[in-house]
Amino acid sequence: MKHYLLLGLAAVLFASCEKDPDLDALDTDYVVYTEFADDADFSGFGTYYLPDSILEPGSGHDATYWKDDYAQMLVAEVAHCMNERGYTRLEGETAKDVADVGLQMTYIAQTNQVVTGGYFYGWWDYGYWGPWWDSWYYPYPVTYTYDTGTLIIEMADLARGDGEVSGRRLPIVWYVNAQGYSFGNARADIDLLLRAVDQAFTQSPYIKTND
């Protein structure tokens, strides 16, 4: 498998001479990771199946499906990008049975809690606060939470599953993982997700047909 890791806005990496990405950009755009199978022939695919909902995993085997207008915007953007690359979307009850590839979209929302306390050497050079101090500490616990979202897109080769029909394993030939902060504003969060989708295709030029 080959993989790539770029920011939601590629210009942050390519327009700068800095070794590390701008931390401000990490706060405002999703980090997009893509990976693909070395033996996948994307130019040989012509049709794809894409559900009209986004999977939201729950605990255990429970799951729900995100189907509102915002979800439809994300699905439509993936379809738009695939169509631009020369693929044809098949719809209907039998579409997944005849399509060359299938795309599954998954969204995971998570609240992260951080508790800090105790000694910490920090980011300053030794002696920054004077010759007697080599570290600092919080004499009390500091707790904060932040929300993140992860969008996963998986492309499966529907024609190359192995095993029996009743238990075929489908090879994933393209994988996208886009992660970033969730600001709690639906419109702003969707804009970030839409840009992440576009970035995933931008950094995956191999996804195209022969046409």
Image: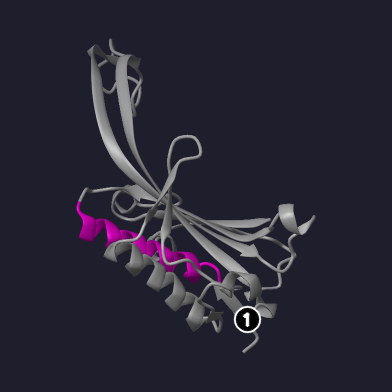
Looking at the picture, does residue 112 appear above or below residue 97?
above
Residue 78 lies in quadrant: bottom left
Residue 141 lies in quadrant: top left
Query: For numbered disc 1, what is the local secondary structure?
Result: loop
Give x and y (percent) for residue 89. Answer: 52, 79
The three-letter code of the residue at mark 1 reads: Gly
Q: Which of 210 and 10 is in front in this view?
A: 210
Mark 1 surroundings: few (<14), some (14-19) or many (≥20) residues within 10 A: some
The magenta stretch spans residue 2: no
Left or right position of 22 against 19: left
Q: Which of 154 and 33 is in front in this view?
A: 154
Q: Which colouring convention does the figure follow?
A: one colour
Image quarter of the C terminus: bottom right
Residue carrying label 1: 46
Left or right position of 91 against 113: right
Q: Which of 147 and 31 is in front in this view?
A: 147
From this viewpoint, is residue 124 visible?
no
What's the residue at 29%, 40% (across, down)? 147
- The magenta stretch spans which residues? 185-205
What's the residue at 43%, 60% (across, down)? 13
Q: Which residue lies furthest to the right in this view?
A: 163
Task: Identify the main secondary structure in magenta.
Answer: helix
Left or right position of 95 against 134: right
Image quarter of the N terminus: bottom right
From this viewpoint, is residue 91 visible?
yes
Give x and y (percent) for residue 165. Answer: 75, 59
What's the residue at 60%, 56% (across, down)? 3
Left or right position of 170 against 102: right
